[in-house]
Image (cartoon, grey):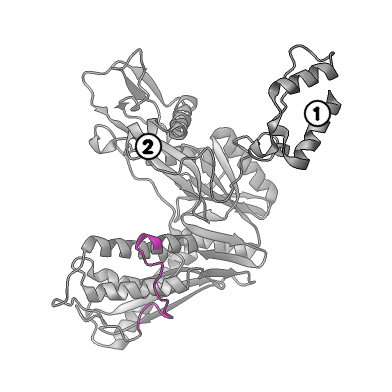
Amino acid sequence: MMQNLEKLRIDDEDDGTLGQTSNSQEVEACKESDTSAPKNSRLLIGHSSQQIIGDPNKGVITRSTLHRDEGHIAFVSQTEPTKIDDALGDEFWVMAMQEELSHFVRNKVWTLVPRPKDHTTIGTKWVFRNKKNEKGEIVRNKARLVAQGYNQEEGIDYEEAFAPVARLEAIRMLLAYACYNGFLLYQMDVKSAFLNGFINEEVYVEQPPGFEDHEHPGHVYHLQKALYGLRQAPRAWYDRLSAFLLEKGFKKGTLDPTLFILIEKHDMLLVQIYVDDIIFGSSNTSLCNEFSSLMTNEFEMSMMGELTYFLGLQIKQSKHGIFINQAKYVRDMLKKFKFENLKACDTPSSSTIKMDKDQLGKPIDPKLYRGMIGSLLYLTASRPDIMFGVCLCARFQSDPKESHLKCVKRIFRYLSGTQDLGLWFNKTKSFELRSFVDSDYAGSLVDRKSTSGFCHLLGNSLISWFKKSKIPLFLSTAEAEYVSHGELLCSSSIHETTT
C-alpha cells in the first residue's frame, strides 16, 4: 500500500494526473496492496497539493500565538458597532462582551435582586472600541459596560467624585529622573480597574442589554463595587489603590498624590498612577519584580513590559537617553482632517504674524476649527515648537475666520514635514533645575495684553513649558519682563519641591 501511495505522489509531482484517477480504482489498488489495514482507518488519497490551504508543516495556530499577516488579524473585528444589535450579530464582539462580564463575576461587582420600589435604577449601555498599537493596527476588541451616570443626583447617589490624575509634566519628570539614574521604566494595566473600587452608596443598575437573565428579566443588579460611568467610580478606584499601596509601605508624593515612593536601604521604587495605567521603575530590578508580583496578587493585571507607548506618547528608552514623540498621533490627525497631501513648510508660523478678530473676514465652521485646535493642543505634550502658534490661534475659537484657518493650516503643513520630531532626554551627570522666560510688551492686537513664555529643564531634559497672557496692562517692556521673572521663580520653586 505504501509503495502505491508513494507512486501516486510521484506521479502527481511529475504530470499532475493524480486528480484524474477514479476513486474506485484507488480503493481497489489499496485493497490489493495491503489486506492488513485496519477496518476503521481512513485513507485520504487523491487530493492535489494545490487544494491545501496554508502550510501544513506549521501545525495548529491558536488564538494566543496568531501573528499579524499582511496587515490583517484573525479573531479581531475590524469595525466598531454603533448599536447593540450590530454587536450581537458579530461573534468577535460577543466574545468581547462575555469577557467583560466575566470580570464582573470574578470581582463580585453586583448581585441580582428584585427591582426596588423606593430607589432609582440607573440604566446601562455598551461601549465598543477597537484598541490599536503605536502603529495604528487593531489588536483587540474592547467592549465596556457603562452605567448612565448622568441620572445620578449628588448627595443621594454619590458624595465624593473627585480623583487625582497625573499631569503630563509629572510623566516627563519621571522620564527625566529615570534617564538621569539609568534605569528602565515599565508599564502595567489594571483590567477593569473601576470594578475594584468599593462604593458606600446604595446603587441599582439595569441588566446589560442583550445579556438579561432569562429567569428574572425584570430584576436589577445591586452594586457592591463601582461601575464604569458612575460619578464616584474614579474616586472609589483611587481610594482602593492608594490605600493598598500605603499599606505596603509606600509613601504618597507631597504635591503629586498620584506618585508613590518606596525606599528600601539605598534603593528607590517610583510608581506613577494614571487611572488604570501604572508606570514604575527602580535602579534595583528586584524591586520591580516584587512590585509586579504584589500587584498581580491583589488585582487582575496586564503586564505590558518596558514602557513604549503611554497616553499617545511613543517612548523609546536606551542607555544613552529617552526619546518622546507623537508620530502616530500626527499621522492620525493629518488623516482625520484630510491634510495628508499638504506641502510641507519649515516653520509653524511666521515671525511677523499679527492676528486679530478680522471682523470683515469670511466666517468658517467653528466646530471644525475647534476640533483642529483641540487636536493640536494635545500634540503640544511633546512638541513645544508649535506651542506659541497653537495658543495664538486658540484665541479666536468663538468666531473663527478664513484668516485664522490659514494660520492653522500652516501649522499642519509644518507638522506634515516634521512628523517624527520629538523630545530627547539626554543622560547627563547634572540634574539641576534651570528655567527660562521671555515676555513681550502689548503684543496682542485685540486687548493689548503682554504674552510670556516659560520653560523648565532638569539637567538637559525639557519637562515643562507653557504660555500665558498677562491680565494687567503693563506700561513698559521692563515691567512686563520683571513680572514674568517673578512668576518664573514661583513656578521653579514648585518644580524644585516636586523633584
The magenta stretch is 335-350
Residue 95, image x, y percentages: 47, 31
Give the vertical position of 497 relative to 231 (above or below): below
**Quarter holding residue 90:** top left
Q: Callout 2: helix, strand or loop?
A: loop
Which quadrant does the N terminus fall into?
top right
Residue position marked by numbered label 1 in the rendering? 5
Of callouts 1 and 2, the N-terminal one? 1
Residue 277, image x, y percentages: 49, 47
Give the vertical position of 187 relative to 27 (above or below): below
Q: Magenta-highlighted stretch: main secondary structure?
A: loop
Examine the rendering and report whether any part of residue 471 can be seen. no
Left or right placement of residue 303 versus residue 238 in this view:
right
How packed mark 1 is, by other alpha carbons closer than 10 Å (few <14, some 14-19, many 20 or more), is some
Residue at 71% in and 25% down: 44
How packed mark 2 is, by other alpha carbons closer than 10 Å (few <14, some 14-19, many 20 or more), is some
